């Protein structure tokens, strides 16, 4: 760990991007506005122009009132009343237009954010295991939440405000030049000064906000990791080290935010100073023009009002640019995920896998998690429908890899896997996995009721079907003794349930799904002996008529398998039933003897 930064490691995908402002991304974000452009956009644009026009007309009305209703120290009360009434009417129209504009921009903005978050989450669910292998959950989560949220202001206010400010700015320039070219040009000359200075800050501001986004992503990743591993942290009394690590990350984020915020707010002083110069020019040169009778006092007051209006949109445009920089830093991260292609692509003309019997064949299957390091080497395996296959071997021998390839969580480097003669690469992934059921050692329990967790195997199942599945795997008895029975709410990851209870629920879930191929990956490893005896009975129901693959370190649980496959460093070394392998006195025999010796020593 770096003592200065407190960073144990840096997630590669969270490194700061050093790219130029990409207008292509602006266009890409703009595509999310297209579905609503015909429905709402005309209303918004109309209200925008009405609001801008009424605002620009008011100073002219004020100038007219000063020059005509209040001239020569006297006054025309009727004309003054008409001018005041006109100004009041313009303010009411402006208020109504702005109210409608804000209402509709919020609607369209929220719809765009909904669509963007939907697309991002939908795409992430299609990505392969390799994508999740190299990214922490917190880093993924922050893109769906924080990064999308950072685009919310851009779509709800930013885009329309940008257009409105541009219209207002152009309108003011036109009016200033139309009424007096000399005075208007003298005031406008200050704009290039502000523009040149502000552009120097743009690169630094964008870089600073990217650092902030990167730091926030790392903090979220660490928080997720810390919460998931809190038991380990407390068990080894590492709370202080973990807190110090978090404090360093938090401090780094704090400093980066302060720096970005300081740069971001540097626009305001530039605009204020430039505005002050504009006012000085106005009153100095304007007074001279009044003396020369080229302009009136009312027009000078109108110009002063327009200067206030003039710097207001420029100030917002500066803030808008900063907002765009933040949005671009977020959109880069979001589109990185959306552009990520699945490592396990579906064939262009993939067909639905028909209802299968369960005949499986692996021919010369090889696989590498990393180039040059084979996890499987030339595996040939033939499985008949209804057979139970036990995969045995030391950790890292390739047992789980075979399962991962069969489910197409990964694709083999070479060779082929067929089910009833159908190459699994040529069928749709959903139709393949719908006929494969998996029960893992660390089964996942979702937030919700026990009934909902079992029904996850078949969402259309009735309550009777759910309870029948639970009965079949001997889970019904403990469920009905829960506070609300099947409707008992389980905590996150099912922490209120024992390991054995969670495993029984996962068995019921698998049985309800009624898969043709069943995979048990260390499914009984975390269960006590008494519960295991119940599950052995449940397995008879679960495995009946199905092709099954069983991975187990407790070799006693696989004695009755039709075929036991022994793997070592990705190579198929032995296969046969229990009696045949014991007679060979090979690797399997050695594993059995070693386990017996261990049980004898601990017993």
Image (cartoon, grey):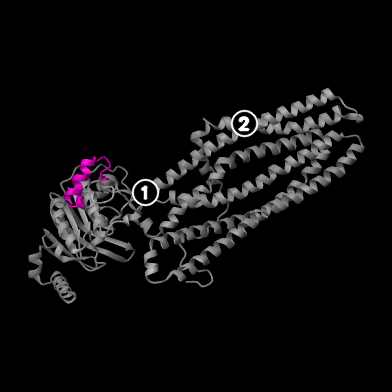
Residue reaching furthest to the bottom: 601
Q: In the rendered view, does 318 fall on the left or right side of 562?
A: right
Between marks 2 and 1, how big is the CA–CA gap? 40 Å
Q: Which disc number belongs to residue 269?
A: none
Q: Determine crowd level at label 2: few under 14, some 14-19, many 20+ residues with C-alpha closer than 10 A.
A: many
Magenta span contains residue 476: yes
x and y percent of residue 156 in the render? 56, 40
Q: Which residues are magenta?
A: 455-477
Instruction: Give me the residue at 83% from left, 34% from top.
Output: 299
Q: Give the number of the mark in front: 2 or 1.
A: 2
Instruction: Give me the residue at 66% from left, 39% from top.
Output: 166
User: Which quadrant would residue 363 be assigned to in this image?
Assistant: bottom left
Q: Determine crowd level at label 1: few under 14, some 14-19, many 20+ residues with C-alpha closer than 10 A.
A: few
Q: In the rendered view, does 195 fall on the left or right side of 540?
A: right
- Element type where label 1 sits in the image: helix
Instruction: Give the number of callouts.
Output: 2
x and y percent of residue 360 in the render? 17, 52
Front in this rendered view, residue 28 or 165: 165
Instruction: Give me the residue at 28% from left, 49% from top.
Output: 450
Instruction: Give me the residue at 28% from left, 50% from top.
Output: 483
Front in this rendered view, residue 131 or 531: 531
Front in this rendered view, residue 212 or 482: 482
**2 or 1: tag closer to the N-terminus:** 2
Report if residue 428 is visible in the image: no
Q: In the rendered view, does 149 fall on the left or right side of 451?
A: right
Q: Which residue is mark 1?
A: 125
The answer to whether 417 is drawn above or below residue 5 in the figure is above
x and y percent of residue 418 in the render? 20, 51
Q: Which residue is mark 2?
A: 47
Magenta span contains residue 220: no
x and y percent of residue 554 in the render? 18, 66
């Amino acid at each position: 760990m770096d003592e200065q930064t407190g960073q144990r490691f840096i997630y590669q995908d969270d490194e700061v991007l050093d790219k130029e402002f990409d207008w292509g991304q602006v266009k890409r974000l703009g595509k999310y506005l297209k579905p609503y452009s015909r429905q709402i956009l005309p209303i918004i644009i109309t209200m925008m122009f009405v609001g801008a026009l009424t605002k620009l007309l008011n100073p002219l009305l004020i100038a007219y009132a000063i020059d005509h209703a209040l001239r020569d120290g006297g006054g025309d009360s009727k004309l003054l009343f008409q001018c005041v009434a006109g100004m009041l009417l313009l303010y009411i129209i402006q208020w109504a237009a702005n109210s409608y504009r804000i209402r509709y921009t919020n609607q369209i903005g929220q719809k765009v954010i909904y669509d963007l978050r939907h697309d991002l989450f939908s795409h992430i669910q299609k990505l392969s295991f390799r994508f999740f292998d190299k990214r922490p959950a917190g880093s993924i989560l922050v893109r769906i939440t924080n990064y999308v949220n950072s685009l919310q202001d851009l779509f709800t206010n930013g885009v329309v405000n940008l257009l409105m400010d541009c219209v207002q700015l152009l309108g003011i320039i036109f009016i200033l030049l139309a009424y007096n070219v000399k005075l208007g040009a003298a005031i406008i000359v200050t704009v290039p000064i502000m523009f040149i200075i502000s552009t120097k800050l743009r690169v630094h501001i964008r870089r600073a906000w990217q650092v902030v986004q990167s730091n926030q992503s790392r903090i979220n990743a660490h928080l997720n990791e810390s919460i998931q591993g809190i038991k380990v942290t407390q068990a080894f009394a590492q709370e202080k080290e973990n807190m110090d690590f978090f404090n360093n990350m938090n401090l780094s984020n704090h400093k980066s935010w302060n720096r970005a915020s300081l740069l971001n707010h540097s626009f305001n002083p530039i605009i204020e100073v430039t505005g002050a110069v504009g006012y000085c020019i106005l009153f100095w040169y304007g007074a001279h023009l009044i003396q020369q009778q080229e302009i009136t006092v009312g027009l000078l007051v109108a110009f002063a009002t327009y200067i206030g209006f003039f710097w207001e949109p420029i100030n917002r445009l500066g803030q808008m640019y900063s907002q765009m920089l933040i949005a671009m830093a977020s959109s880069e991260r979001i589109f990185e995920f959306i552009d990520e292609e699945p490592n396990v692509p579906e064939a262009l003309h993939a067909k639905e896998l028909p209802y299968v019997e369960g005949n499986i064949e692996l021919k010369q299957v090889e696989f590498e998690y990393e180039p040059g390091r084979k996890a499987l080497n030339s595996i040939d395996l033939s499985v008949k429908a209804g057979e139970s296959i036990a995969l045995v071997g030391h950790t890292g021998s390739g047992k789980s890899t075979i399962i991962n390839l069969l489910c197409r969580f990964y694709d083999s480097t070479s060779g082929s896997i067929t089910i009833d003669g159908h190459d699994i690469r040529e069928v749709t992934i959903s139709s393949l996995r719908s006929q494969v059921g998996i029960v893992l050692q660390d089964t996942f329990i979702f937030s919700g009721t026990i009934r909902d967790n079992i029904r996850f195997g078949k969402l259309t199942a009735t309550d009777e079907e759910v309870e029948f599945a639970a009965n079949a795997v001997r889970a019904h008895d403990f469920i009905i003794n829960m506070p609300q029975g099947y409707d008992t709410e389980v905590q996150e990851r099912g922490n209120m349930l024992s390991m054995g209870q969670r495993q029984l629920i996962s068995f019921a879930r698998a049985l309800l799904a009624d898969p043709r191929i069943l995979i048990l990956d260390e499914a009984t490893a975390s269960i006590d002996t008494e519960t295991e005896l119940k599950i052995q009975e449940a397995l008879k129901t679960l495995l009946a008529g199905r092709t099954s693959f069983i991975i187990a370190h407790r070799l006693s649980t696989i004695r009755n398998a039709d075929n036991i496959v022994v793997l070592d460093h990705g190579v198929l070394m032995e296969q046969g039933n229990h009696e045949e392998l014991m007679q060979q006195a090979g690797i399997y025999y050695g594993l059995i003897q070693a386990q017996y010796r261990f049980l004898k020593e601990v017993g």
